[in-house]
Amino acid sequence: MEVYALSIVGVLVVCLVSLGLASYSGMSKGKAGLLGGTVFDARDENPLYRIDRVHMNSVEALGPFAIATVLAILAGVGAVLLAVLVWLHVAIRLAHAVVYLRGGEPAKGGKLRTILYVLAALVTFVIILVAAWAALT
């Protein structure tokens, strides 16, 4: 397993980011006097909405990414290739979170944040493909 250490650490970083965003979202809602759950003022200008959505986006992306990465390890995907894909995903997800939290024009739907979300999903898709290839060959 040590050959996959970089990939494992990358998955753990994504998990920690998701946990951090959950805490940030909960604390932000608490400071605003809101209960947990959906923020109903769903406007890009609302920082609580952006915090909530970036957290939920991280949760939505985590499952497929983590499962695909673990299966890629089990299937014996090349350690270097997998580490590159994992850390590319980590970098894109971190950039997505920063862009979304900062708000403004790049954070609006169809703009930079959407492009980053889709790029991270494409990297996950590539991990799925290389895991499937390794499993079948």
Image (tube, rainbow, N blue to C red):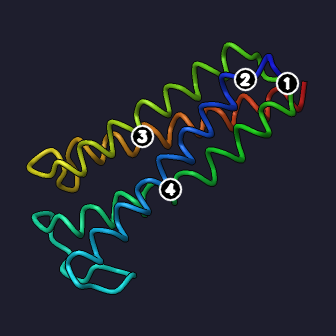
Q: Earlier in the sequence, mark 3 or mark 4?
A: 4
Viewed as shown, does residue 60 lie left or right of 2? left
The amino acid pointed to by label 1 is: Met
Q: Residue furthest top?
A: 80
Pointers 1 and 2 in contact (C-beta within 8 Å): yes
**Quick one: label 2, few (<14), some, or many (20+) residues within 10 Å?**
few
Q: Is residue 108 above or below residue 81?
A: below
Question: x, y (%) of residue 128?
Answer: 69, 38
In the image, what residue occupies the spot 58% across and 25% down?
85
Pointers 4 and 2 in contact (C-beta within 8 Å): no
Helix, strand or loop at mark 4: helix
Question: x, y (%) of residue 93?
Answer: 42, 40
**Quick one: label 4, few (<14), some, or many (20+) residues within 10 Å?**
some
Q: Earlier in the sequence, mark 2 or mark 3?
A: 2
* Residue corresponding to mark 3: 93
* Residue corresponding to mark 2: 5
Q: Earlier in the sequence, mark 1 or mark 3?
A: 1
In the image, what residue occupies the spot 50% across and 33% down?
89
Q: Is residue 68 above or below residue 92?
A: below
* Distance between the alpha carbons at the discs numbered 2 and 3: 20 Å
Helix, strand or loop at mark 1: loop
Helix, strand or loop at mark 2: helix
Viewed as shown, does residue 52 lie left or right of 69? left
The amino acid pointed to by label 2 is: Ala
* Distance between the alpha carbons at the discs numbered 4 and 2: 21 Å
The amino acid pointed to by label 4 is: Leu
Mark 1 against mark 4, which lies toward the viewer? 4
Q: Is residue 79 above or below residue 25?
A: above
- Location of the N terminus by quadrant is top right
* Residue corresponding to mark 4: 19
* Residue corresponding to mark 1: 1
